[in-house]
Amino acid sequence: MNTISFHLNSTDSIKIDESRYRLNLTPALRIPHEADKTCTVYLHNLMFNNNLANVDEALYKNDKVALNFDSGGVLSVNITFPAGAYSLQDVERKIAQVIYDNYKTAVWDPMDTAVKKLANTPEGLANPYTSTWEQSLTASEVANLSRIPPDVTGRFPSNKFYLKPITIAPDLISNRVVCVAALPSLTVAKDSTLFTSLLGYSAAQINAWSGGLVTAASAARVDKTRSVAFHVPSLATGTYGTGGALGGSQLALVPITAKLGETQNWEVSVPIEVPCRAAGSTIGHIDFYLANEDGLPINLLQDRFEGVVVVKWKI
């Protein structure tokens, strides 16, 4: 049995696009034509950081948040999220930061004044740049503030509490995202692609935001990439793709088990050997890339990944 392995590393390879790379081979790979029936390839191990973008306009069309603030006249608040890996907490903080930075006089200040006049006396809006952000109420507490005084005794310094402009949280019972604004005058507007594509809200909900605590119609896709597929089109052609068509180049589908920001190390326990097309030809380079479980490209946010691919044959 003849065996040769290739260490495919995104750092040392030519970048073709956000997730596709090319490794030039010196010398070129030559496998005898007689090995045509026995030549196989499999993925031995894969390493990457779980820092994969779940917001990316180019890939997913989901980077926009549009809000309306009504203070006698409707003012539009438009927010564009840079490509990145965002948690629910990241989303609500980013919204607050943009309102504070870009709409302070027109939106933040009047909202802050109005919040201080609400029932059960909040101290104002939670500032995303100060410790008041950590003294904010939960989504359910905000939604019930007019009826139920929040129990903040011992939770926050001096028992003072604040409201985030928009609070976004998971509802573990319904497995949906819930969202509530500090004031009914701040509403989510149409064209909020981040709410529809990432958080699970429907177009109907966005086009007629009901106010109060709004539960998303569908499950969120904050973990937009749940598994990573490793593809080597230069070597593998004998797999079925996610669309069911024969001729794919996927060697393995690796479930993501590492926490956000941590390194995922995966090693095969039982190799799945795929027919290799290298026999009888000369391969001067190897193209490889990652995709998610839906077959969509992955934005690695300038991070690296590497894997070891093994080619086997006998004559």
Image: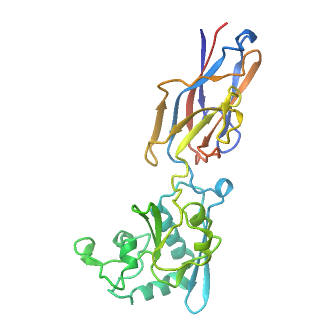
Give whichever of 122, 103 is nearer the camera. 122
- Outermost residue toward the left? 154
Nearest the viewer among 102 and 246 is: 246
Left or right: 4 in relation to 235: left
Could you say where residue 37 lies in the image, as x and y percent from the top left?
A: 70, 14
Q: In percent of the image, x 44 and y 84: which residue is there?
A: 112
Determine the residue positioned at 64% across, 9% down.
314
Q: Going 56% across and 83% down the picture, which residue do you hit?
A: 69
Q: Residue 265: give x, y in percent of width and height.
A: 46, 34
- Residue 166 at x, y percent in the picture: 47, 74
Tell me if residue 180 comes above or below residue 54 in the rendering: below
User: Which of the image's four quarters has the N terminus?
Assistant: top right
Count of numbered circles on the image: 0
In the displayed structure image, the side of residue 299 where residue 261 appears, left or right: left
The image quadrant that residue 300 belongs to is top right
Please state, as top left, top right, bottom left or bottom right, where the C terminus lies in the image. Answer: top right
Q: Find the residue positioned furthest to the bottom.
A: 72
The furthest residue to the top: 315
Q: In this picture, is 244 found above or below 267? A: below
Q: Residue at x 35, y 75 (%)?
A: 141
Q: Position of residue 10 (x, y in %)?
A: 61, 35
